Amino acid sequence: MQLAKQLTDTTVIGTASRPESQAWVKSLGADAVLDHHQPLDQELKAAGFDGVDMVISLNQTDHHFEAIIAALKPQGKLALIDDPELIDVRKLKMKSLSLHWELMFTRPLFTTDDLAKQHDMLSEVAAMVDAGRLTTTLGEVLGPVNTDNLKRAHALIESNSTIGKLVLEGF
């Protein structure tokens, strides 16, 4: 979201269900925040949007797939970074939607011709962090990696009540 706001002039719509997480998403630059526990098409309309040209799905794509398709305008783009178990890509055909996957390791794994672009992008992100244009998404540092902290982190994630990233550091 922060990169989209820094590098493009696009309207960024985020999703979050609780008031405190909605406020956090807004603080990171979202122009609008929708409740992902509600029907996405209704949330979009209530926020004044008739649909969207692009969706970046970071997690639970298989769970939200139908809603994403409904939200996308014809010839829209769906980008994923997660690993949905099973999605029926035939459902993209009616609207001529395109599907794009991103994996940060593709360039080095396959030694692509644009391998150096990885360095360039990371350098640009580092410069934005150094300039204060990007803020951390760190939510909480739970302490060292041990059984108790792993259980605590897992419980927090399962509670669906975290805001930001959880970090375990050291052993």
Image (cartoon, helix red, strand yellow):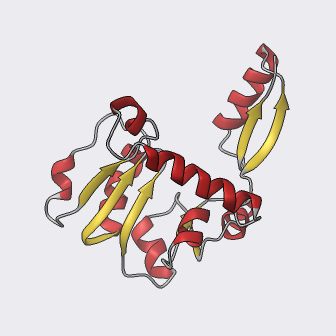
In the image, 54 versus 88, the foreground residue is: 54
Q: Is residue 159 visible?
A: yes
Count the labels in the image.
0
Q: Residue at x 71, y 49 (%)?
A: 164
Q: Position of residue 58 (x, y in %)?
A: 48, 49
Question: At 72% from the left edge and 35% from the top edge, which residue is drawn?
Answer: 156
Q: Position of residue 112 (x, y in %)?
A: 33, 39
Name the foreground residue: 163 vs 170.
Answer: 170
Residue 51 percent across, percent down from the top left: 36, 76
Determine whether 37 is above or below 147 in the image.
Answer: below
The residue furthest right is: 143
Q: Which quarter of the rendering shows the C terminus?
A: top right
- Describe residue 146's horizontal placement relative to residue 92 as left or right: right
Q: Is residue 84 above or below residue 25?
A: above
Give the camera-side residue of 96 and 38: 96
* Quadrant of the rendered image containing residue 3: bottom right
Dividing the picture into quadrants, the one containing residue 32 is bottom right
Of all residues shown, which one is farthest toward the bottom? 48
Which of the image's four quarters has the N terminus?
bottom right
> Is 66 displayed left or right of 74 in the figure?
right
User: Residue at position x 71%, y 67% from top?
Assistant: 133
Which residue is pictured at 65% across the width and 71% down the height? 29
Q: In screen coordinates, is 81 left or right of 12?
A: left
Q: Is residue 1 visible?
A: no
Placement of 43 over or under 65, stated as above or below: below
| 119 up-or-down from 154: above or below | below
* 6 relative position to 131: left or right: left
